[in-house]
DNA sequence: TGCTCCTGCCTAATAGGTATAGGCAAACCA
DNA sequence: TGGTTTGCCTATACCTATTAGGCAGGAGCA
């Protein structure tokens, strides 16, 4: 009777994989127990409850995504940085839809403040330094970028652009270009 | 023993109210049965299953929202129409968060094609007529508007802008202005 | 080597949600 | 008035979440 060696970390990772395969909603304690070939209550030694599991996956995804974005943006500026930033989000969402959905989980303020979510905000601001916007315009712009990218990605994942031309990639490029020129114009105002 | 007189329509309406009060996720057959003081299986004469209920609420919300948007946009053009369009979405989401969430439910292609979703797309295109964009720019722009508005509203509902200045309303206005000027610039290209 | 404790997974049990099968009585209709 | 239909009911089965408490095997100590 070898023990499977469950840990919160392994469960979180497995939960993230399960989310990508079956959707974030399909991430249940039961499904995870099946995956480890273990009885359901065994997981409660490692996880407070199913919400705890979801939060752990969310935090994991936020970290992973922040790392990717940071990597993509490193050494770039201006339009290049903006495009890299945008593409990093979109690619992560396409590659890991379940984790991306997890990253959108609403966290309570303290948890959010201690999460990689703050790095995301910092990186967005860093991108905008290339466009020298004053406050409060910079904040407005951060919110706009977050809205567009999140909105586009979530519509695309929901299949909103599947059944019509032009391809999602074209619209994406057009939008990134548009945002770039918008921010450049705004900065000269 | 007077019968409560359940109908799919009344159940859908009650489900929409329940969604606004307790969240779309809280809309269950059980909760709805409690609300009508009726046993759970009674609802299955009127609804195929719980997914059917959710879809009905989604279709209802799409209709209601399309009506509001149509009303808001009527008789306006250009920046005015864009702002009215945007505000109609945002106000609906703030007033009826559960219905708004319902309206974002992923529908299968046939259902979507028969839903008020197509009116939404048509109205977005109508707004853009004021900016004379060619294809494929018009489609890109429709997607961008959908992304920004949906993204902003969903971030705002998730509480993303609660704990920091400036107020969500200011950013919203700034974004609508920005989109207007962006579209005006794009049209002259 | 043997004892003890503790950890980690187990069984048992409760509660709530989803869904189906089949019953019964009120309401409708001829 | 009697038959049929309709609409809500009971009974039942299964799934998920969660808690309580049990047991065995490995770690540490004598």
Image: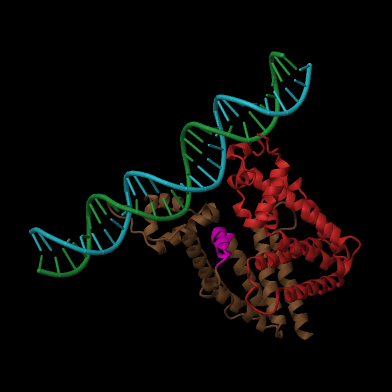
Chain colours: A brown, B red, C cyan, D green
**Span shown in magenta:** A94-107
Asked whether A116 falls inside the magenta stretch, the response is: no
Give percent across and percent down for residue B171.
Answer: 73, 75
Picture coordinates of residue A15, whole percent (x, y): 47, 58
**Which SS does the magenta portion mostly show?**
helix
Q: Which residue is rendered at x = 65% and y = 45% of the image?
A: B53
Is the C terminus of chain B in the top left, top right, bottom left or bottom right quadrant? Answer: bottom right
Question: Considering only vertical position in the picture, is B107 above or below B88?
Answer: above
Q: Is residue B108 above or below residue A183?
A: above
Q: Name the quadrant containing residue B128.
A: bottom right
Residue C18 to residue A46: above or below: above
Residue at (87% x, 72% y) in the render: B188
| Quadrant placement of the N terminus of chain B | top right
Residue A99 inside the magenta-drawn segment: yes
User: Residue sitting at 68 percent across and 74 percent down?
Assistant: A143
Residue A90 in the image, given as x and y percentages of width and height: 62, 65
């Amino acid at each position: 009777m070898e023990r499977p060696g469950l840990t919160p970390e392994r469960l979180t990772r497995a939960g993230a994989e399960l989310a990508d395969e079956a959707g974030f909603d399909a991430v249940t304690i039961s499904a995870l127990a099946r995956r480890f070939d273990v009885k359901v209550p065994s997981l409660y030694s490692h996880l407070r409850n199913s919400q705890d599991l979801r939060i752990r996956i969310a935090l994991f995804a936020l970290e992973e995504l922040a790392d990717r974005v940071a990597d993509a943006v490193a050494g770039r500026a201006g339009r290049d940085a903006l495009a890299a930033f945008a593409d990093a989000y979109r690619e992560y969402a396409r590659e890991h839809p379940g984790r991306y959905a997890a990253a959108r989980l609403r966290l309570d303020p303290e948890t959010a403040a201690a999460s990689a979510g703050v790095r995301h905000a910092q990186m967005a601001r860093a991108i905008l330094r290339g466009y020298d916007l004053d406050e409060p315009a910079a904040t407005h712009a951060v919110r706009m970028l977050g809205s567009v990218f999140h909105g586009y990605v979530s519509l695309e994942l929901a299949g909103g652009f599947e059944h019509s031309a032009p391809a999602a990639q074209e619209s994406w490029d057009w939008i990134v270009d548009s945002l770039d020129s918008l921010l450049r114009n705004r900065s000269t105002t």
